[in-house]
Image (cartoon, rainbow, N blue to C red):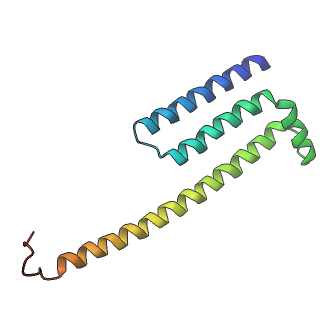
Amino acid sequence: MRDRLEIVIVVVAVLFVLLMLELVRRRQLREKYALLWMGVGVVAVFLSFARSWLDKLATALGIDYGPSALFLFSTLFLLGMAAHLSWEVSRLEERIRRLAEEIALSRARPPKDDEPITE
């Protein structure tokens, strides 16, 4: 049973990495995020083969069941990603607001003598 689970995890992780590469190729995902998610796929493959290592780590942290530690780390990772993406969105919203103000101000000023009038 465990061998089949490892095979499924590896297949899913490889498909995930291929999906990330395709999204980058189509320019629907920036490289920095694709590298991050491909890293997640590699870690998933590593952890599928290193179950005893995960169990030892969980025991050292006082967690009785290894996959619970994996769930904890996954949740913390996703919380970190959500915080990072919230920061990125906030930064981009501020930049968009500034650009919109600049456009509004440039349209509001009267044109110079040698500048054509655009509507």
Instruction: Choose between 37 and 67: the one closer to the eye.
Output: 37
- Residue under the image location 84 percent in, 37 percent down: 54
- Residue under the image location 45 percent in, 37 percent down: 23
Residue 31 in the image: state x and y as whole percent.
51, 45
Residue 52 in the image: state x and y as whole percent.
87, 31
Most distant residue in the front direction: 114
Whether 4 is drawn above or below 115: the answer is: above
Q: Quadrant of residue 55?
A: top right
- Residue under the image location 57 percent in, 32 percent down: 17
Count of numbered tags: 0
Q: Is residue 2 left or right of residue 39?
A: right
Residue 80 in the image: state x and y as whole percent.
65, 55
Whether 113 is drawn above or below 116: the answer is: below
Q: Is residue 45 left or right of residue 116?
A: right
Q: Quadrant of the N terminus?
A: top right
Whether 3 is drawn above or below 84: the answer is: above
Q: Quadrant of residue 50?
A: top right
Residue 101 in the image: state x and y as whole percent.
30, 75
Q: Quadrant of residue 105?
A: bottom left
Instruction: Choose between 51 and 25: the one closer to the eye.
Output: 25
Q: Is residue 116 left or right of residue 104?
A: left
Q: Quadrant of the C terminus?
A: bottom left
- Residue under the image location 54 percent in, 47 percent down: 33
